[in-house]
Amino acid sequence: MKELVIKNLKIEYGKNTIINNLDLHVKKDELLVILGPSGCGKSTLLSGVSGLLKPTNGYISFGERIFFDSEKKINMITEKREIGFVFQDYSLWPHMTVKDNIIYPLKLKKIEKTKINLILDDILKDIELSDKKDVYPNNLSGGEKQRIAIARSLVMNPSFMCLDEPLSNIDPILKMRLLKLIKKIQIEYKIPMIYVTHDQHEAFEIADRILIMDKGEIIQSGLPEEIYNEPNSAFVAKFIGRSNIVSENVFDRKKNCKRLVIRPEDIEISEKGKYVGFVKKKIFRGSFVEMHIKYNRETLIIHVNNDKHFVGEEIRFNINKSHVI
Amino acid sequence: MKELVIKNLKIEYGKNTIINNLDLHVKKDELLVILGPSGCGKSTLLSGVSGLLKPTNGYISFGERIFFDSEKKINMITEKREIGFVFQDYSLWPHMTVKDNIIYPLKLKKIEKTKINLILDDILKDIELSDKKDVYPNNLSGGEKQRIAIARSLVMNPSFMCLDEPLSNIDPILKMRLLKLIKKIQIEYKIPMIYVTHDQHEAFEIADRILIMDKGEIIQSGLPEEIYNEPNSAFVAKFIGRSNIVSENVFDRKKNCKRLVIRPEDIEISEKGKYVGFVKKKIFRGSFVEMHIKYNRETLIIHVNNDKHFVGEEIRFNINKSHVI
Amino acid sequence: ANNQLESNQNAQTDQNVEVNQNVETDQEDEETTEPTDKRITVYISGPENMINKLEEEFETDRGDVADFLIMSCGQLRSKVWTEKEAGQIQADVVFGSDPLIYNMLDDEGLLDSIDIKNSEMIADEFKLENHNYFFVNERYVTLIYNKKNLTGELPESYKDLAYNDENYSIVMADARQSSTGLGIAISLYQLNDNDIEYFNKLSAKDFMLTKSNGQVPSLIMEGQYDIGVAPYDSLIRLRKKAKNDGYEMPLEAIWPEEGAIIIRRPIGVIKNAERTDEKQKTSEELVNFFISKKAQLITSKFGFASVRKDIENDFIPKDIKTCIIDWEKATKDEKQFKEQYSEIFK
Amino acid sequence: MKNNLKNNTVKFLNKNSRKLSYSNSSLIFLFTALVVLIIIVFPLVYIIKISVIKDGRIFFDGYIEVFKDVKTYRALKNTVILVLGVLAMSVPIGTILAFIRNKTDYKYNKAIDYFVFINFCIPSYVLSVAWIECISRGGFLHRILKMILPTIKYDISPYSLTAAIIVLSIHLYPLVYFAVGSGLKQISDILEKTSFLLGGSKRKTILGITIPLVYPTLISIGFLVFTRTIANFGVVSNLVLPIGTEVLTTRIFQAISELNLTVVAVLSILLMVISLAVFKISKRVKYKEIENTNNTIYYYALGKYRIGVNIMLSIFFSIALFIPLVTLLISSFLKRWGLPIEMEYLTLNNYKYILFESEVTKRAFANSIFFGIFSATSAVIITLFILYFKKHNNRLKDKLLFSISNLPLSMPNIVLAIGATFAWINPPFKLYGTKWIIIITYIALFIPIVLKHASGLSSNISLSIDDSAKTLGVPLIKRIFVLYMPQIFSGLLSGWIICFLISLREIPISLLLYRKGTETIGVMLFMIQSNSYGLETTSTLAVIVIIFSVIGNVLVKKIVKGNSVNERISD
Ligand SMILES: Nc1ncnc2c1ncn2[C@@H]1O[C@H](COP(=O)(O)OP(=O)(O)OP(=O)(O)O)[C@@H](O)[C@H]1O
Ligand SMILES: Nc1ncnc2c1ncn2[C@@H]1O[C@H](COP(=O)(O)OP(=O)(O)OP(=O)(O)O)[C@@H](O)[C@H]1O
Ligand SMILES: [Mg+2]
Ligand SMILES: [Mg+2]
């Protein structure tokens, strides 16, 4: 089946190079999450892929169809790329009802009315909004709008989907439900997707593969476990989960200056622990307690499940897992 | 010192009662986080407290000053309540520079210029934005805007602060830094605060006390640990952290129909476990692995730190902690 | 008088024949050309009622062959000039305004020479030797005042108006906006030996300039101004209207000592190489019609003095003095005059 | 069920019609550019040509003549005084009224809307007639004063630069009112609430936050008022020329009477350059546009000021609206203006004459309505394209198109008409003498007006609305008409209505370009006074035009409301 291939992509705004020499493959059936801080170029990348923005340089293709090729001077217009796109701000048409928003693109294709109605009813059932058919977008909540936006791009049966921070304004319960809906759709419809977010929880919930971007470049890409357990830089380690990033020589007397990433949950308090520190601070965090342990000149963050120690107490601990960057 | 007291508060929009019979105390120096789903009335409550909205009924006072008393027909105007207020969308004035935004309240108080400049420099140093003094808000990033908004409400030396989802549009690294900043300010300036959010991670990071709201009512209020460990309803249990909510008789043959909340991290896989189930699904979630365990007719979610089991495997487990609701 | 009647009848029968021809060609050309192509365009200024009447008369004889475009004399002037500058004047026949513009057009060779029938009926003083335009009628410019407002000593001459000590409020048409106004002003200038001081004196009083000539008597009648310089014919029309509608008319005229200024209203046919013979013919006929007794009787009813020997100008007192200005000289002086004039009225 | 849905959804690839989209875009752009080129640029080029070419040679005598002439500087000075005066009056009036209407809990705020609208329906020329009817020596003010103090010596002249400033301000403040009103509606209540929270009183908040937030609107509308003032001719010719005071437009008119078209062209170019310069400067003013994040509006409670506001508004509307209207109405029933108001001098004949006896008047009404509808609609469509390209493509050529389209605004209508004469008198484009030349010139005049009304709304629309349509395969034409247009519809509509109103009263263009059969109401307005009829007939025609405008507007709004979506967008 079809695969999205991006080679050597360069996108500029005027003189500012936003994306430089980016290579990326999105496999068929894959849901790729792009994670990155604000302004790193995530939306710009999606605009490039969908043709809303013309790259300066590079090559983009999907299956046999070439979307963009700066050498051959190919630039397929957006309307033809058949990419479903869900924008962060929903971008529903304010002057059309939910129903019209969803079926408008279908109507343009001159599909028969009965068929359109079937499609509409189905998708509305899927997104659980059958009763809001005749409502105008302004009277919907954020989560509802988002679902409509997703539905609207789905009925066109896109061969590829881009979602740009689609859930950033939605409360956690609803977010969880929508994430599940998106994942379900991706699996059922077998559509490759790029999902952009800056929220790692969303990423872990939904990603087949995670790609970390910063300043227009891909920093790391891999399975969620890989990214979490083997971050290739302090940036990634910090961006995903919490981490202690310390110089190796804090623990060993080696003279090298490599740095270690130690995840808070990988430090285990144990009476026979190798290292000795004392508790500086404790914060309750729901499913665990965060302890700040003073060790040497560093403060280490530890996540523990039980809250037996008190501030000031001396404790011993081991490090179960660490990762050199 | 001063305490915010709300008694019997009722707020209506037209005929819709948004908040009904609400009682609330915020202690001096306390940072109270209000958590609740979208549309539950959080912002409405803050508007009532700050006088932007006139309640239908009730009593609000701060220290000796009565803000609102429907019986005595007192309704102090917003300008006089001296409440610092930070909105979700920053609400910086687009026609003023950062500096002018911040010193606006000081100018209103006719403070001398030299003193204003001193205060300005101080606060800008605090929020680390000394170099952006003459920039217009449109040219700032979300995080910067938010810091300005906080600074602006601080310079007038409020005796109380309300923050309405101040960080919901900000990426996680920055969010963490701002949360720390807010907490620091609260401690240093000794200002009681109400902090509204729908993000539990924020709540746990910053709260002295958490209050859960739904449909205009207080569902539960207490220390973060209490809320997490002893949710008084399925709603709270679901809203805070993930939980398995199952009927008691799944585990015991008792005939009662009470329900149990079991936190995923409180189920321990152990070879000598009391219960037998099998692994239905595994999801990597960064600091832990989520396993879905089929037991009886229920699916239980378990969080484990190590990923030794495979899908389909039969496992035994114990329940370390549970809570009846 | 018999003679004239006959010639009139002749003219009419002639015209009838032409109408018939017209009908035939109409039928032939129906598919290819629109009837508008056969109609000539006439730029014309003057009282609307009078012009409508003239058009009606002409067209009962000739059919719908002319479009009359009524405008003020100043407008007519600038429209003709703008079109000239843009390439081609769109009118076939131009009637109204003052001789200045006709002189200019004729100097540039833009007027067609026309054969005037029965030219012997035109009084000699109106016959132009070396110009391709013709006078249709003339207006007498006098002092007009409101007898309700003006109770003091009346001025007896144009000169008095400026130089006596009475503090009237005075109104006149703006020489820069109205072409008759220009004619009047430049006449006054000539009467005062090209001395601009006259206007200086006027402007020192309560003095006002109107857009058009017709407004002058109106403003005086309405009581806004006491006295002004304006064509007598407007007074006649106002009187008529007042009588019809049943209200009092406080206007009176003073025939100044210098003599009433005479302003002649020319008519001309614009030169246009592309004009069809048929239209050329209609144009010439129209000019002849305006000079015919029938048309002249109409215009004289509206207060314009006829150029024909056989029509009495009975609305004008018999014994008044008139003065005719030298239009050739006026055309030469125009630029200098306007500059001085603009300096005063700023 | 899933499968069902999948089978039902359409395969994306089955339409070749979308292949057209790209060429569609260039086609529509080409079309728009061509229209702008022909309608606006072509006549403009002629004006420039007249200014530098005479008898086939290039010469700059016109410029030298104009710039050497002290009259030019005098006129320039008076123009500056006039413009500053009008700005100083109309902007505060419009702003204050808009504020009361849109930002306070004033009870009769709908009434303000109506009054301001009717005010705008009165042609400026007619307003100046009403002014004369009121203030002149034979006018109503003098008569009333005389009744009270029979010995009074009345020497207020209705003619002065101040008079023109007052009349033009009354005529133009509605523009400010409408624009500032929609600007105020975009202010999110949070911005004001924040000020209260920080201890700002209402007064401080209004002056420090609310009003400054509409500065961008004020500047752009101030520019519109500015251009309409320097381009105005009707009022100044009525109120300023009679005392010989000159402004640039009357200089132009003089030059026309003096048959000096070179000077006309040079002066017009001067006007255009001034406008452009002011426009450039006004763009420099550094204010950020408000982003419409939230459409809740904060309403200030008037409280104890309610009575004061009532009194103020009553006085204002009496002066600006009721006195002129009543004056016109009374005058329209007089047998002859200037007669005492007594039974024997009253008549219905004026109405009878205009409505039933005069064929030309009937034709003029029909023409004006047709020209208005046709030109306003065409202008709206062209503007829609211009705005769409400016917003969504924003290439150099889109911006250029946008800027060029704004040019006619700064030119007096009469200059537009002269440009049109030159452009359209010769074959192959021989439109002179047909109704099309008037229509085309109207369109050129209307495009920038519609632009001014709709561009604000356009800038508030999220770009992703169009982007999302692109990703859904919606072709350009549909994106423009079905998705973009409804969102700026209210702006286009108010632009349309204003253009339509203008065509019911426009004088200079039609006066220079009309021909038998293409007379307009404006021509009638002008001619009627120039001939044997006095102010009474002008007043009658004016009353009819005003009634007509009001009815027309109500009708249009009714029709549009029936199938409009705007209400829904804004709630
Ligand atoms: N229209 C534009 N013109 C110039 N620069 C732009 C434009 N749009 C975005 N940029 C710049 O490009 C960079 C990348 O922007 P982009 O919107 O792709 O970021 P992002 O990763 O999507 O951020 P966010 O998470 O905040 O949406 C930013 O530095 C931004 O300032
Ligand atoms: N101006 C208004 N008029 C009528 N109803 C309103 C208005 N503002 C809010 N509401 C309703 O009041 C209820 C509570 O709104 P509120 O803004 O307090 O919710 P919230 O808890 O702050 O939600 P969110 O997390 O989305 O900000 C909602 O049902 C909302 O629809
Ligand atoms: Mg983005
Ligand atoms: Mg809220």
Image: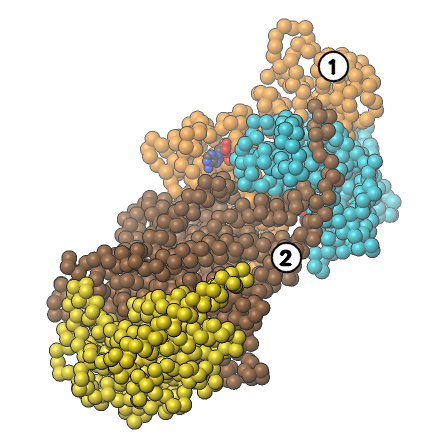
Chain colours: A cyan, B orange, C yellow, D brown
Residue displayed at 20% across by 79% down:
C314
Measuring from the top left, give residue D138's x and y in whole percent.
21, 68
Q: Which of C116 and C194 is in front in this view?
A: C116
Which residue is at a point 63% across and 55% down the rendered structure image? D28
> What residue is shown with label 2?
D29
SS class, disc 2:
helix
Crowding near the residue tagged with mark 1, few <14, some 14–19, many ≥20 C-alpha atoms within 10 Å: some
Q: Is residue A209 left or right of residue D536?
A: right
* Residue displayed at 53% across by 75% down: C274
Which one is in front, C30 or C331?
C30
Residue drawn where x is 38% and y is 40% of the image: B76
Comparing marks 2 and 1, which lies closer to the viewer?
Answer: 2
> Which image quarter is the N terminus of chain D in?
top right
Quarter holding residue D29: bottom right
Residue D494 vertical position relative to residue C168 in the rendered view, above or below: above
| Mark 2 crowdedness (10 Å alpha carbons): few <14, some 14-19, many ≥20 | some
Answer left or right for D394 relative to B287.
left
- The amino acid type of the residue labelled 1 equals Tyr
Answer with the quarter of the image where residue D330 lies. bottom left
- Amino acid at circle 2: Phe
Q: Position of residue D188 (x, y in %)?
A: 49, 46
Tell whether label 1 touches label 2 (CB within 8 Å). Answer: no
Image side of residue D7 versus residue D34, left or right: right
Q: Compute the Cα span from label 2 to label 1.
A: 66 Å
Residue D388, given in percent of the width and then of the height, sits at 59, 53
Q: Which mark is residue B295?
A: 1
Q: Report the number of numbered marks.
A: 2
Q: Which chain carries label 1?
A: B
**Left or right of B19: which side holds D18?**
right
Pointer 2 indicates a residue of which chain? D
Callouts 2 and 1 in the same chain: no
Q: What element carries label 1?
A: strand
